[in-house]
Image (spheres, rainbow, N blue to C red):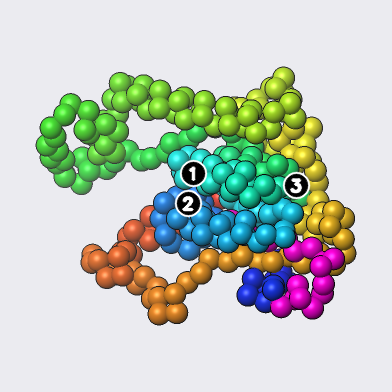
């Protein structure tokens, strides 16, 4: 979709040829689930910060465009990325335009809220302002297999929510308290960033529900409907150049090699499978 973005390395050469009247807009694409993992298609502060820093360093750019495509994930990583965007915007005095692709939901919408404006395709999915925790219980399974679980702890709550132990109502109560705290952080940030654009009387606005951008624009979750090319050409002229900012990888960097039962390449086949399933679960909530 964005293959025709101008490459970052060629940008200065193009700028010299085209003259001062041609505006350059750096574009950072953040796509994937939000988690601290360094696997591909993940969003986190470690991978996003270098790209964002380079984007905001382009002095003559009046704005930075951020393309977001994420179903959510870690609330901490979401907040760290959003805060970093705002810190750079303030330091460099630049406007931030966020463009939503398929989805900006949950943590994805948290990051999108860091923009001064949010522009989305009418069919983009946005919202899901809530907190979710999910897991499995294996108590009956290990009992049928004749497996006994042996757990030794120092601290009465160290085995909280152990999937191999029966669910304890007190553990669930503690988890819900944590979720409520995180939910308040999420709601407060959206209210702060969206301000009086939000229709706070809209039922279910902070319930975790999600909508298409065509509907969400009525609630103030989105500012406009459109795409990055149409929007930037209208604002900065037909000759505007989109400068693609990508994650840099070392020439001699080696991909991590999955290895069952070992630590070769700092990962394992089981870790990769669990991570992939977790990511897919995030996307599938939105039919993607």
Q: Which mark is residue 119?
A: 3
State how many labels appear: 3
Check disc 1 and report its element: helix, strand or loop. Answer: helix
Lateral position of residue 137 relative to residue 196, left or right: left
Mark 3 closeness class: few <14, some 14–19, many ≥20 residues within 10 Å:
many
| N-term mark: 3 or 2 | 2
Instruction: Return the residue nearer the eye: 177 or 254.
Output: 254
Task: Say whether disc 1 or disc 2 marks the residue closer to the N-terminus.
Answer: 2
| Label 3 to label 2: alpha-carbon separation | 23 Å
Give residue 175's position: percent from left, percent from top.
37, 28
Q: CA distance from mark 1 to mark 2?
A: 6 Å
In the image, the segment drawn in magenta is 13-31
Q: CA distance from mark 3 to mark 1?
A: 22 Å
Determine which residue is flagged by label 1.
80
- The structure residue drawn at horizontal position 75% and vertical position 47%, both measured from the top left corner, is 119
Up/down of 89 relative to 234, above or below: above
Element at label 2: helix
Q: Quadrant of residue 154?
A: top left
Asked whether the viewer can see residue 286, the reply is no
Between 257 and 222, the one nearer to me in the picture: 222
Mark number, residue 45:
2
């Amino acid at each position: 979709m964005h293959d025709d973005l101008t490459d970052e390395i060629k940008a200065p050469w193009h700028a010299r040829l085209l003259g001062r009247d041609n505006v350059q807009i750096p574009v950072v694409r953040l796509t994937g689930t939000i988690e601290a993992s360094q696997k591909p298609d993940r969003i986190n502060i470690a991978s996003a910060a270098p790209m964002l820093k380079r984007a905001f360093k382009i002095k003559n750019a009046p704005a930075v465009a951020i393309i977001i495509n994420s179903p959510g994930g870690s609330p901490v990583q979401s907040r760290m990325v959003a805060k970093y965007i705002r810190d750079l915007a303030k330091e460099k005095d630049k406007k931030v335009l966020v463009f939503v692709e398929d989805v900006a939901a949950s943590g994805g919408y948290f990051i999108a809220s860091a923009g001064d404006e949010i522009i989305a395709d009418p069919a983009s999915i946005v919202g899901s302002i809530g907190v979710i925790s999910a897991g499995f219980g294996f108590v009956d399974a290990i009992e049928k297999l004749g497996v006994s679980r042996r757990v030794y702890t120092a601290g009465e709550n160290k085995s909280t929510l152990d999937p191999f132990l029966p669910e304890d109502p007190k553990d669930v109560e503690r988890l819900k308290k944590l979720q409520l705290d995180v939910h308040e952080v999420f709601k407060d940030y959206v209210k702060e960033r969206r301000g009086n654009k939000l229709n706070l009387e809209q039922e279910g606005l902070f319930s975790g529900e999600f909508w298409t951008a065509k509907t969400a624009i009525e609630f103030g979750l989105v500012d406009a409907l459109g795409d990055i090319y149409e929007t930037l050409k209208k604002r900065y002229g037909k000759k505007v150049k989109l400068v693609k900012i990508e994650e840099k990888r070392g020439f001699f960097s080696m991909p991590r090699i999955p290895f069952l039962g070992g630590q070769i390449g700092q990962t394992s086949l089981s870790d990769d499978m669990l991570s992939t399933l977790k990511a897919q679960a995030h996307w599938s909530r939105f039919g993607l």
